[in-house]
Image (tube, rainbow, N blue to C red):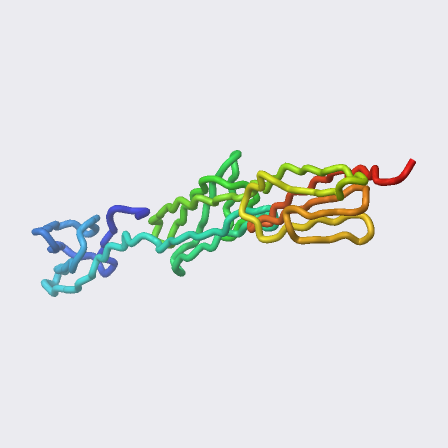
Amino acid sequence: CRTDSAWLRYTGADATSYQWSGPSGLISNVREIRSGLPGWHRLVAIANNGCSYEDSVYVSIDRSLPILALQADTITCTRTTVSPTVATDSTAIAFHWTGPGGFSSHVKSIQVGNSGIYTLTVIAANGCSDSAILNIPSDTVHPGAFLQADTITCKQIGKIQAGMITGNIIRMQWVGPGGFSIQSPSSDVVLGGTYTFTLWGTNGCTFTDSVLVIQKDRIP
């Protein structure tokens, strides 16, 4: 890919005539020729004494592109950076990454913390290049909930409740006074104080909020 032709030159003793022949009817009578045709090229050189020298050379074309494949994990709240996997063959000698926010790198293995479209261009030893596009996704949406709490009175016990829960949840937990702990969105409570509710999402993101349970079940 760096050149479109090859120089073929007779390097022996001076001759009186040169006869080149090659692919596609190539004919020339000079000492040195330039050919972009693949295949065998034959030279007959005739010296002053009438002796001749014959030889052949094969011109090959290598415009094969480097093999390139990309893969990357999703950026999450717990996996804040990713290193894309680059699969290429041994012919690759140079790499150039571009990406969001003006990102640029000339190494094969990169580590990034921004999602978006990344492009890798690989250059092979033969000068041929190939590019691949990689979309690095992100999932950093936090779960959510709306918390409510009832007041403890002489007529009713208290109640805490988490409603309107959003997100892909793998765990939830209430904690509060007196070692209170329960993995449920709602519960009855008998002690006043601050109760904290936490959600854990599948993407590693969390939600935490608190409510105050007021206690009014004491005789004045």
Pick the residue in front: 92 or 1: 92
Residue appearing at x 66%, y 46% in the figure = 186
Judged left or right of residue 43, residue 163 is right
Point out the residue furthest to the right here. 220
Residue appearing at x 63%, y 45% in the figure = 206
Pick the residue in front: 146 or 144: 146
> Does residue 89 lie above or below 27 as drawn?
below
Residue 91 can be seen, yes or no: yes
Q: Quadrant of residue 47?
A: bottom left
Residue appearing at x 44%, y 44% in the figure = 135
Query: Percent from the top left, x then y, of residue 205?
Result: 61, 46
> Does residue 220 lie above or below 94 as drawn?
above
> Does residue 123 lie above or below 42 as drawn?
above
Residue appearing at x 80%, y 37% in the figure = 214
Pick the residue in front: 112 or 200: 200
Judged left or right of residue 93, residue 60 is left
Point out the residue furthest to the left here. 25
Query: Percent from the top left, x then y, of residue 212?
Result: 77, 38
Query: Total number of numbered labels?
Result: 0
Residue 19 can be seen, yes or no: no
Query: Percent from the top left, x then y, of residue 1?
Result: 30, 48
Where does the C terminus fall, quadrant-wise?
Answer: top right
Query: Percent from the top left, x then y, of residue 59?
Result: 21, 57
Judged left or right of residue 159, residue 16 is left
Pick the residue in front: 135 or 19: 135
Judged left or right of residue 130, residue 72 is right
